[in-house]
Image (cartoon, rainbow, N blue to C red):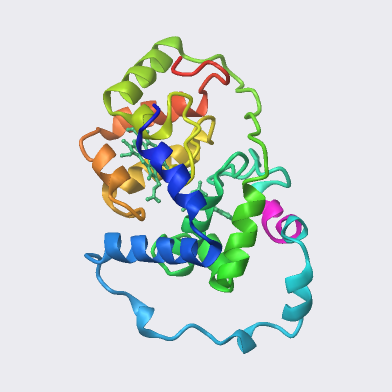
């Protein structure tokens, strides 16, 4: 996996300063999505004065606390909440990936009512603060499934992940790196939905990487991949 796309991403992202990273996200999103129909982006962003009067004080509150207050209800205090359907685990996720997704939500380039509402009011510094805090959360394993893994489905999922080069970008241990997300042990329902959305174009991504990766895969095989990735055995890369 050394020398793969994620290896380049790590050094590239580290070399950039904070504002430059935001700009890189913006530029990547604009370039990759230029072909999409323009939506109501013509309106100027609301001035900071639209924020409640408490804003200056809030800025001094550490992101750990803001995460606990704003995000934990859905994502869990440790970044994983298996009781909340459709809500991805953020624990173990990379800062560069997280900030890019927050940017896409804020700009209306990735659609989800809850996250659009959350990201809408964020300044660039907030996205950076939340993303950096998320990156400090160690991966949290899923709660044990009620039924044992279907061995045949796991084998099929592993073969699909090799065949379709998922491991090339996401790594043999599916832990990703910088702009390539960790996917190992992500929630199955979320994986299912998001893979289908990459295929249908509902989630365009900030690069074409994922739409290209899944365009030729049947929905049935995508579901098998979701099954396998959600149950990915920790500590045994490629197995
Ligand atoms: C009301 C519930 C809710 C709250 C509150 C919430 N989120 Fe989310 N978040 C979601 C859902 C649902 C998704 C998945 C959206 C989708 O399917 O596109 C998501 C997705 C994300 C993602 C993308 C993850 C990925 O794997 O692509 C990030 C990053 C994120 N949230 C960060 C935050 C942060 C930071 C906060 C607090 C400032 C927050 N969220 C608050 C529900 C919530
Ligand atoms: C060419 C590199 C590349 C390949 C091959 C690839 N991915 Fe990805 N993947 C990415 C990137 C980059 C993203 C971030 C998407 C974005 O927002 O643009 C991503 C995002 C994802 C996500 C979303 C994670 C989240 O938290 O929302 C899932 C799930 C995923 N990939 C699964 C897969 C699977 C399964 C395969 C194999 C069929 C695969 N990927 C192949 C690069 C790749």
Q: Report x, y in % for residue 155.
A: 39, 13
Residue toward you, 73 or 131:
131
Please report the residue visible at 44 percent of the width from the left and 18 percent of the height from the top.
238
- Quadrant showing the N terminus: top left
- Quadrant of ligand 1 in image: bottom right
Q: Report x, y in % for residue 112.
A: 47, 59
Q: Report x, y in % for residue 16.
A: 49, 57
The answer to whether residue 105 is visible is: no
Span colored in magenta:
67-74
Please report the residue visible at 70 percent of the width from the left and 83 percent of the height from the top.
52
The answer to whether residue 183 is visible is: yes
Q: Report x, y in % for residue 183.
A: 48, 35
Residue 32 falls left or right of residue 51: left
Q: Is residue 22 above or below residue 14?
A: below
Please report the residue visible at 48 percent of the width from the left and 68 percent of the height from the top.
106
Q: Is residue 51 above or below residue 215?
A: below
Residue toward you, 172 or 84:
172
The quadrant holding residue 143 is: top right
Q: State how many labels appear.
A: 0
Direction top: furthest residue: 151
Q: Is residue 189 above or below residue 200?
A: above
Please report the residue visible at 53 percent of the width from the left and 35 percent of the height from the top.
186
Predominant SS of the magenta segment: helix
Residue 215 falls left or right of residue 238: left
Say if the magenta span includes residue 14: no
Residue toward you, 58 or 69:
58
Residue 143 falls left or right of residue 97: right
């Amino acid at each position: 996996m050394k020398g793969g796309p994620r290896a380049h991403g790590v050094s590239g992202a580290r070399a950039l300063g904070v504002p430059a990273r935001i700009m890189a996200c913006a530029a990547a999103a604009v370039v990759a999505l230029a072909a999409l129909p323009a939506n109501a982006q013509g309106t100027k962003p609301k001035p900071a004065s639209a924020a409640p009067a408490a804003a200056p004080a809030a800025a001094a509150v550490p992101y750990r606390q803001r995460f606990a207050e704003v995000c934990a209800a859905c994502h869990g205090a440790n970044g994983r909440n298996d009781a909340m359907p459709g809500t991805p685990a953020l624990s173990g996720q990379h800062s560069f990936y997280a900030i890019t997704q927050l940017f896409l939500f804020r700009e209306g380039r990735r659609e989800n009512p809850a996250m659009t509402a959350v990201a809408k009011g964020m300044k660039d510094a907030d996205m950076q603060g939340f993303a950096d805090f998320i990156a400090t959360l160690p991966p949290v394993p899923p709660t044990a499934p009620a039924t044992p893994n279907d061995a045949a489905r796991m084998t099929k999922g592993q073969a699909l992940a090799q065949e379709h080069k998922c491991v090339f970008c996401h790594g043999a241990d599916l832990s990703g790196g910088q702009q390539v997300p960790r996917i190992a042990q992500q929630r199955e329902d979320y994986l299912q939905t998001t893979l289908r959305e990459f295929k249908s174009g509902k989630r365009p991504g900030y690069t074409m990487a994922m739409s290209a990766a899944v365009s030729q895969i049947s929905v049935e095989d995508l579901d098998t991949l979701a099954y396998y990735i959600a149950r990915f055995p920790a500590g045994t890369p490629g197995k």
